[in-house]
Amino acid sequence: MSAGTPSPERAEPVRKRSGRRRIRWPVVGGRGGDHAAIYHFLTPIFQGPTRAEFKASLEDPFYEPQDRLLIKRGSQIASHVHLTHRVMQFGPLQIPTAWLDWLATLPEYRNAGDGTRLLHAAEKHITETGALVGLLQTKIPHFFRRTGWALCGRHCYSRADARAIMGRLLDRGLRRRGRKHLQIRPWRRWEEAALVRIYDQNLPGNYGPLQRTEAYWRWLVRRQAYDQIFVALDGPGLLDLEEINTKIVGFSVIRGEKIVEMLAAPGQKSALAELLARACGDAVEHDRHSVVLHAPPTSSLHRIFEQAGGLCHFHEADRGQFHMARLLAPLKLLRVLCVEFHRRAEEAGLPRPLELGLLVEGKKYQLEITRESARAVSRRIGRSYLQLNVADFTRLVLGQVQWDRALSEGRVRASTTLAAEAGRVLFPRLPLWHPPFDGLLA
């Protein structure tokens, strides 16, 4: 998908408090001829990206040069942000999203408001191109909080000793006598369709993974942000080109000691254990003491790491990095989610018709749920409503509110008992998690 070019602004003088004037330079969309200058702008600020990673970002099948917004002072780039357009799986639904990366301003031009202006322009741009949710990772969450971004989502991975994991897998019967074993071997380039198939089979019902087209998959594997991909095969033909006699039933993506992605086809849970065993065996062979598994919080594999004496990291921050989100078009997003609101109300047996209002720092929304359907409207809240700030509203809609804590701290206030009960049902806690494979640097 491509993004339109933001309408250019003119450079205009702005009077400072001292009485002197300074020029407010416009936000413009990038062009192909800017790429070399952008690379040299980013490198000293971030100590990256590498040339290989920057080149790979230009080859993203959804990339357009105008996805980079710039503030130029004359011919010099003063500020930059990169917008990446994606579609996020959200249970049974798909939500258009946009990721913000590499937002920076040259040190000599900071504290002039350019970063905030560029952020506002980016939010407007991605909203106009259809994104409903903005996402990013940052080490400076306070900067983004000022414009309505909220901490949302957690890092989730487990770490344990490789030999201890192998011992635990053996205890669970991985090598039980008489059991049919899968074949584990490195992935071949012509087996790309199998990765696409298994990934797509795992999408429904998950919250956070990105939709991956065939072109996106080709780009993802071609940029070489991993060390090895292993596949699990069920059958005799280890080099079957079309999976006629041998079917690939699982795969894992390895980078160093980390398993950055591991999935199996439905009904093939044993493939995960076999792939994990292979990763542990390779770690021991390369004299690595531990193995790290990145997986959603619902994955049963975290339990194996825990039983092996390891630790599960499930926190907002990891090495100073935080996940943040912003609802770009709240009413549109609520309308997309109406089918889920109706299903949740029906499964919980909520009395209907039901009206639940949301009062968000003066803005009003209302969910109206009948036995047949649900709809979202604005500018009214009714008698039963929840009152909350923008950050908690973002977490509420994306399933990240801890209800007991939010209510006890007064961050979410319910006007009636019905509002509190309906809020818990319609906005349950969800396992929102973004696989790291999509964001690895080459």
Image (tube, grey):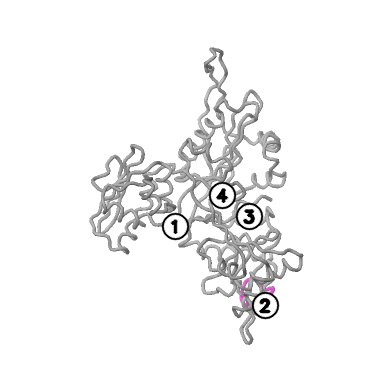
The residue type indicated by label 1 comes to Leu
The residue type indicated by label 4 comes to Ala
Label 3 packing within 10 angstroms: few (<14), some (14-19), many (20+) = many
149 over 201 or under it: above or below: above
For marks 1 and 4, the one nearer the N-term is 4
Disc 4 and disc 2: Cα gap in Å? 45 Å
Magenta residue check for 241 = yes
For marks 4 and 2, the one nearer the N-term is 2
| For residue 26, side relative to residue 277 (left or right) | left
| Residue drawn at (46%, 46%) of the image | 133
222 over 49 or under it: above or below: below
Foreground mark, 1 or 4, reads: 4
The percent position of residue 433, horizontal first and vertical second, equals 52, 56
Query: Which residue appears farthest toward the bottom when viewing the image?
Result: 178
Magenta span: 238-246
Foreground mark, 1 or 2, reads: 1
| Residue drawn at (66%, 64%) of the image | 291
The percent position of residue 43, horizontal first and vertical second, equals 70, 38
Foreground mark, 3 or 2, reads: 3
One can see residue 215 in this view: no
Residue annotated with mark 1: 430
The residue type indicated by label 3 comes to Leu
| Residue 317's disc number | 4
Residue annotated with mark 2: 237
